[in-house]
């Protein structure tokens, strides 16, 4: 199969090469997919994209015109793809539904640890030979209530870590898992009211967009810790900024940002105009922002590449990609 991989980072190349073993004719380009860069897809069968690529209806229409029949995303989330439009043009869509939930869960807990024990401030001070510790007081995780919203792959992996720390783990999911004994099922309202730490593990959908807004924040504990490694738009970020200012939110850990497209994954240090809302958030000591790196472990990167190539293998053999099928109307029975 001929494919073009958009938004490739130099560090991804070795993982893709190892997974592909020259089976597919793959062109790697660093540009993100957009209407302008869609031209690179000419003559290919598939495009392979990432989370901040533009896979809107307009771009899909162009890809269909160029002969593309498959879109594979190197991510679990598919919110960047207009799957309905892909279906309309009979383009099949696949994701990587389960590559290394531990990578994401560990990063979300790392954010929580670093915020609690003020590691960034402590490290900065230490580098200046300021070893005062007056402002570095944290709390024990043991005994605290952690509320997990979303109990799929990453939510369950986070639950296992928090349980191991001695936390009281409560959770909310539309499809609450039946095979867990370490998470107490609660309503969303109770989760907001009871949790010291809230960690988000749901996909971005119309139902979850701006899940955390002023109304939700008002019902949370004062000084709550909020961790988001899922998708930026789960938070209404302007409401979150107000809650930080009022002290409602005591700690904020973000690996994703509502307006990260065109910003994250690139160096914008020398931009004269910087994102105002993100700048506002980052002025607080109790805010920690990482650039969408929760997935970034050696193991996860290899698994993402392996499964992406496997999706191409199966499509080439006219077979179903199974759980990786992300077509708007699940096509597992059609192929
Ligand atoms: P998953 O599909 O295994 O689990 C998602 C869970 O959310 C499911 O159990 C589902 O029932 C639940 N859910 C869906 N809509 C809901 C709603 N409206 N209310 C309550 N529960 C709902 O997904 P996984 O692997 O746990 O990943 C979660 C999200 O994390 C992904 O969709 C992706 O956006 C994000 N992600 C971020 C990464 C990063 O590097 N920052 C890496 C991987 C995933």
Image: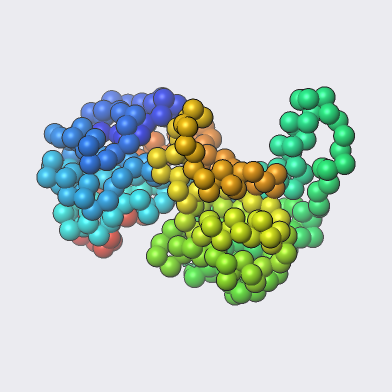
Percent x, y of residue 228: 57, 52
Looking at the rendered image, the quarter that the N terminus falls into is top left
Whether residue 280 appears in this view of the structure is: yes
Point 41% across, 62% down: residue: 205
- Report which quarter residue 128 is drawn in: top right
Task: Using residue 221 as the reference point, say whether residue 179 is left or right of it.
Answer: left
On screen, 93 above or below 295? below
- Report which quarter residue 79 is drawn in: bottom left
On screen, 290 above or below 12? below
Percent x, y of residue 31: 32, 32
On screen, 249 above or below 30? below
Percent x, y of residue 63: 18, 44
Residue, far front: 272
Task: Using residue 200 as the reference point, say whether residue 93 is left or right of it.
Answer: left
Looking at the rendered image, the quarter that the C terminus falls into is bottom left
Whether residue 156 appears in this view of the structure is: no
């Amino acid at each position: 199969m001929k494919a073009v991989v958009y938004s490739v980072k130099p560090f991804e190349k070795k993982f893709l090469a190892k997974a592909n073993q020259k089976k597919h004719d793959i062109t790697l380009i660093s540009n993100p997919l957009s209407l302008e860069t869609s031209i690179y897809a000419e003559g290919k069968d598939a495009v392979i994209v990432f989370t901040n690529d533009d896979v809107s209806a307009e771009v899909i229409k162009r890809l269909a015109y160029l002969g593309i029949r498959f879109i594979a995303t190197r991510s679990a989330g598919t919110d960047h793809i207009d799957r309905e439009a892909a279906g309309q043009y009979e383009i099949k869509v696949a994701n990587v539904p389960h590559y290394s939930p531990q990578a994401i869960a560990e990063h979300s807990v790392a954010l929580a640890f670093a915020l609690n024990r003020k590691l960034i401030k402590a490290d900065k001070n230490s580098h200046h030979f300021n070893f005062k510790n007056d402002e570095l007081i944290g709390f024990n995780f043991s005994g605290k209530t952690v509320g997990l919203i979303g109990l799929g792959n990453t939510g369950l992996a986070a639950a296992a870590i928090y349980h191991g720390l001695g936390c009281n783990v409560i959770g909310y999911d539309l499809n609450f898992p039946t095979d867990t004994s370490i998470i107490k099922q609660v309503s969303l309202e109770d989760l907001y009211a009871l949790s010291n730490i809230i960690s988000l593990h749901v996909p971005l959908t119309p139902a979850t967009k701006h899940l955390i807004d002023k109304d939700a924040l008002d019902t949370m504990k004062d000084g709550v810790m909020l961790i988001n490694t899922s998708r930026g738009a789960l938070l209404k970020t302007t409401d979150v900024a107000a809650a930080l200012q009022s002290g409602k939110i005591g700690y904020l850990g973000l690996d994703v940002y509502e307006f990260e497209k065109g910003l994250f994954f690139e160096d914008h240090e020398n931009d004269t105009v910087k994102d105002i809302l993100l700048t506002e958030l980052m002025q607080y000591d109790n805010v920690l922002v990482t650039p969408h790196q929760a997935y970034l472990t050696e193991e996860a990167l290899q698994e993402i590449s392996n499964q992406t190539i496997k999706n191409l293998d199966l499509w080439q053999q006219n077979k179903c990609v199974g759980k990786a099928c992300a077509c708007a109307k699940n096509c597992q029975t059609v192929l």
